């Protein structure tokens, strides 16, 4: 488990959450892709989610709209060192790729 990883349940908006993480140096962007991999938009490599250092995980919860249920992961690319955010839906509206990546990131943090 990464001793510096943080987890917060936060009522903040997606924009507020990404602004906060950007102010902490997470300025690059990532995407969840098939086979539980993460695509880095800085170096354009795909890495298994389980190999990625998760620094912070924030959630927005959709009290009135399930589409507002988002997980914002602050991660570091193991290939190029880019620090950035990976925004994913969770719950019933998540894509299979998002669910797989989020599960792998959570598993990585609890080992």
Image (cartoon, grey):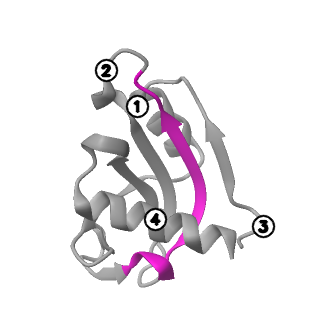
Count residues near mark 4 (Cα–Cα under 10 Å), then give few for <14, some for 14-19, many for 20+: some
| The C terminus - image quarter | bottom right
Residue denoted by label 1: 14
Q: Earlier in the sequence, mark 3 or mark 4?
A: 3
What residue lies at 48% left-to-right and 53% top-to-bottom? 73
Q: CA distance from mark 3 to mark 1?
A: 25 Å
Q: CA distance from mark 3 to mark 4?
A: 19 Å
Q: Earlier in the sequence, mark 4 or mark 2?
A: 2
Instruction: Single out the residue that lies furthest toward the top.
Output: 64
Cβ atoms at labels 2 and 1 below 8 Å apart? no
Q: Nearer the viewer, mark 2 or mark 1?
A: 2
Is 57 colored magenta in this rendering?
Answer: yes
Q: 35 above or below 85? A: below
Q: Where residue 56 sits in the image (x, y, percent)? A: 60, 53
Residue denoted by label 3: 3
Q: Where residue 61 sits in the image (x, y, percent)? A: 46, 28
Q: CA distance from mark 4 to mark 2?
A: 22 Å
Q: Which of the two residues, 82 or 65, is positioned nearer the viewer here?
A: 65
Q: Which segment did they paint magenta?
A: 48-62
Q: CA distance from mark 2 to mark 1?
A: 14 Å
Cβ atoms at labels 1 and 4 below 8 Å apart? no
Instruction: Single out the residue that lies furthest toward the front.
Output: 92
Residue denoted by label 4: 103
Residue denoted by label 2: 65
Q: Which of the two residues, 95 or 10, is positioned nearer the viewer here?
A: 95
């Amino acid at each position: 488990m990464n001793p510096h990883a943080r987890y917060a349940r936060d009522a903040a908006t997606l924009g507020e959450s990404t602004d906060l993480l950007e102010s902490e140096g997470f300025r690059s962007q990532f995407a969840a892709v098939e086979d539980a991999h993460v695509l880095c938009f800085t170096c354009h490599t795909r890495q298994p989610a389980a190999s990625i250092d998760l620094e912070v995980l924030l959630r927005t919860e959709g009290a009135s709209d399930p589409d507002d249920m988002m997980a914002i992961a602050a991660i570091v690319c193991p290939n190029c060192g880019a620090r950035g955010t990976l925004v994913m839906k969770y719950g019933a509206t998540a894509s299979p790729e998002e669910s797989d990546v989020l599960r792998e990131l959570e598993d990585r943090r609890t080992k």
